[in-house]
Amino acid sequence: MTRCRFYEAGRRWGLLFAGICLLLACAAKAQQSSAGLPPAPRKPCIVLILASDLGYGDLGCYGQTRIKTPNIDKLAAEGMRFTSFYAGSSLSVPSRAALMTGKHTGHSAIRGEGGMTLLQAGDVTMAQILQKAGFRTTALGVWGLGDVSSSVPSSKGFEEWFGYLNDAEAQNHYPQYLNRTGEGYDRLVEIKGKYSDDYFTECALNFLNYAKPEPYNHYRPFFLYLPYTIARANLEVGRATGNGMEVPDDAPYSSESWPPPEKNKAAMITRLDGYVGQLIDKLAQSKNDKNTIVIFTSANGPHKDGGVDPRFFSSTGVLRGLKRDLYEGGIRVPFIIRWPLRVAGGATCDLPCASWDFLPTAVEIIKTPPPQDIDGISLLPALLGQVQTNRHEFLYWELHDHTFKQAVRMGDWKAVRSGTDGPLELYNLKNDLGEKNNVADKNPGVVATIEDYLKNARTDDPNWPACTAAQTANNGN
């Protein structure tokens, strides 16, 4: 009898052990086959694509009907499209600074495109945080945030950099030389007048080939930042020829009866769309697309430089304003996030948010504390389809471009003024998205609340002085 009891007990333990082994084997197999990804947990990779001077209405997924953008439209269909997202500024340099540092233009070291357009030694960028967290960090395109040793990309978290250090030089889409920095080198690279954004895309595809997720024991997540020059104009060429929209050819719009600058602008945007398609295809080939966050946005709204008229393609949709002002058309921009593992496809989000929110969002995703002195909030709950309890009470901008202007968004209210003492224009975006009807005199309480906020919205900076309306009128800036 005793022998039988020991036999039965041994048999039960043997069956239990076999069952545990079978479960472990199944779990391992499931991990290996799940979307081709290494075993979790694993930090996602990030690809941030930043266009220049691309309007809210320049993409098919935002209402464009004549410019073809099928790849970006697909990106939106497979991810989340934001409809109330704002650039950091209506000028590209301070906008990129806001994106990199998580600070709006009332607190940033860079608030315009003249004077001290340098990140300071103490400014912490998103790239520095990600690099410290173990990410490979590469940037290809336009920097514009400083060309002294303390503010160049290699000092601000990028292991590899290739592109224009100076923003003014990025007007020329066919440069002879571009700057390259990396481990142990800093040099000019001759590209012999090749179209720069084509070159940046080739480099990005090569990087993605190199940064494959396998083998897992050598895996490092990556942050690839692509601040393109499209769709900015070359002002020098535009003054000489009337068409400053530089592009290798105007396909697929060659047969259209449009003015040449408009054909070139459309061709530039469709060319950028082609880059996006190539990047997504490369991520899929490397089996790294499911857990890669791809972001597409623009540094600011559309311009009227180089012979183009933004009304031709309704580049701002119904929005008022352009690049270099603070009405909606100058600062409200496309913003799309695709992350197949976490973000539901085909989603839209109308949460008012801005480019300085991306840094805290990224650091929450990778579970790293953000800097304490930033203005952004994490958008991760909204991305995951959850209730976004942490919201901005105010969004703030100031503009230093020969004149001094300020803008505030508070809920559905939008305020704009010139000079620190100029009259406040007030618009209700809920029923007046085009900012046509100034209702300041009908809403004194709202005006008083915004005026009170503006008293402490910014920090003083001798490089970016706040001017009165009279000083602004006389270009006292």
Image (tube, helix red, strand yellow):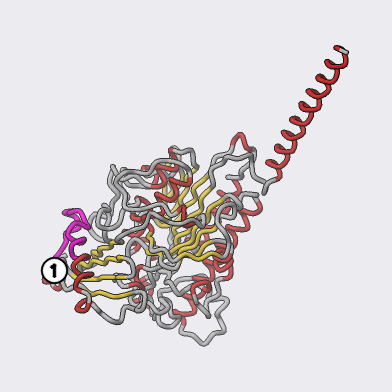
Q: Residue furthest top?
A: 2
Q: Which residue is mark 1?
A: 421
Q: Percent position (x, y) of residue 87?
A: 37, 63
Closer to the camera in the image, 223 or 192: 223
Specify the amino acid type for callout 1: Asp
Residue 456: in magenta span? yes
Residue drawn where x is 53% and y is 71% of the image: 270
At which x and y percent is residue 291?
A: 58, 49
Residue most toward the bottom? Answer: 257
| Circle 1 SS class | loop
> Which residue ends up furthest to the front in the rendered image?
1
Which residue sits at x=46%, y=84%? 259
Q: Which residues are magenta?
A: 450-467
Which quadrant of the rendered structure holds the C terminus? bottom left
- Residue 359 shown in magenta: no
Query: Residue 231 appears in which quarter of the rendering?
Result: bottom left
- For residue 417, above or below residue 278: below
Q: Position of residue 419 (x, y in %)?
A: 17, 68
What percent of the width, then of the height, locates residue 381?
46, 53
Residue 174 appearing in the image: no
Q: Which quarter shows the N terminus?
A: top right
Residue at figure coordinates x 34%, y 74% from the top left: 429
